[in-house]
């Protein structure tokens, strides 16, 4: 089973850009929150979340096309690899998310971008952020415009949850890591 330590080792072989590493951390934390919600192994889900963009920096135009074989060779399970591939569903491949882990990763990949951007605009960062603040930003299509809201909505539907419910779980999880995610209170 993939550990966070191993996920960090593997991502370090392909990814050096600070914003991509920060994104990996955001997704990692959100995945841990959702794992707890579903009664799953949070550490395992975090590791999969951290590694989800394994090939992105090297192959942004062919994202997820250079992932399966190297991760198989690195010892990841078929379940872990499939979860990573499924976050590209309908965007770069046709690997449909079916498990809660796959659906969660598909959803939080975009969702955490809006949470991160909204938290950065607040004097106290994410520390006092309520889901209602997030929802205002979510509804404003010009805010964090590159974050695909349709993917988020589709992912939430797959999970059988409302956007605000998933966002609330992710925000609460991210509060615990506010400083590491660079969204703590400003000095």
Image (tube, rainbow, N blue to C red):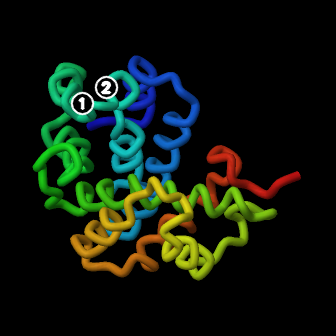
Query: Residue 187: where, in percent of width, then height?
Result: 88, 52
* 91 on left or right of 12: left
Residue at 57%, 78% (x, y): give it. 136
Give the image quarter of residue 7. top left
Residue at 26%, 72% (x, y): give it. 159
Query: Residue 24: where, in percent of width, then height?
Result: 46, 41
Instruction: Please give the residue where the numbered disc 2 appears in the rendered image.
Output: 59
Give the image quarter of residue 108. bottom left
- Whole-angstrom CA distance, mark 2 to mark 1, is 5 Å
**Cβ atoms under marks 2 and 1 closer than 8 Å:** yes
Quadrant in which the N terminus appears: top left
Q: Secondary structure beneath disc 2?
A: loop
How packed mark 1 is, by other alpha carbons closer than 10 Å (few <14, some 14-19, many 20 or more), is few
| Numbered-mark total | 2
> Is 173 drawn above or below residue 9 in the view shown?
below
How packed mark 2 is, by other alpha carbons closer than 10 Å (few <14, some 14-19, many 20 or more), is some
Give the image quarter of residue 132. bottom right
> Is 185 drawn above or below residue 71 in the view shown?
below
Residue at 18%, 20% (x, y): give it. 73
Query: Residue 167: where, in percent of width, then height?
Result: 47, 71
Q: Secondary structure beneath disc 1?
A: helix
Disc assigned to residue 62:
1
Q: Residue furthest right?
A: 187
* 187 on left or right of 129: right
Disc assigned to residue 6:
none
Residue at 62%, 63% (x, y): give it. 118
* 20 on left or right of 89: right
């Amino acid at each position: 089973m993939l550990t966070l330590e191993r996920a960090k080792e593997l991502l370090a072989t392909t990814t050096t850009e600070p914003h991509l590493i920060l994104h990996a951390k955001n997704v990692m934390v959100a995945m841990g929150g959702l794992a707890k919600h579903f009664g799953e192994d949070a550490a395992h889900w975090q590791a999969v979340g951290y590694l989800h963009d394994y090939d992105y920096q090297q192959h942004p135009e062919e994202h997820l096309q250079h992932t399966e074989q190297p991760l198989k060779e690195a010892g990841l399970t078929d379940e872990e690899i499939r979860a990573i591939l499924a976050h590209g569903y309908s965007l770069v491949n046709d690997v449909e998310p079916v498990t809660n882990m796959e659906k969660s990763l598909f959803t939080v990949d975009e969702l955490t971008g809006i949470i991160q951007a909204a938290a950065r605009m607040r004097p106290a960062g994410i520390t006092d952020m309520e889901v209602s603040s997030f929802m205002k930003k979510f509804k404003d299509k010009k805010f964090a415009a590159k974050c695909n809201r349709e993917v988020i909505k589709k992912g939430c539907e797959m999970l059988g949850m409302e956007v605000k419910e998933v966002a609330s779980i992710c925000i609460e999880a991210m509060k615990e890591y506010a400083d590491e995610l660079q969204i703590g209170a400003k000095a």
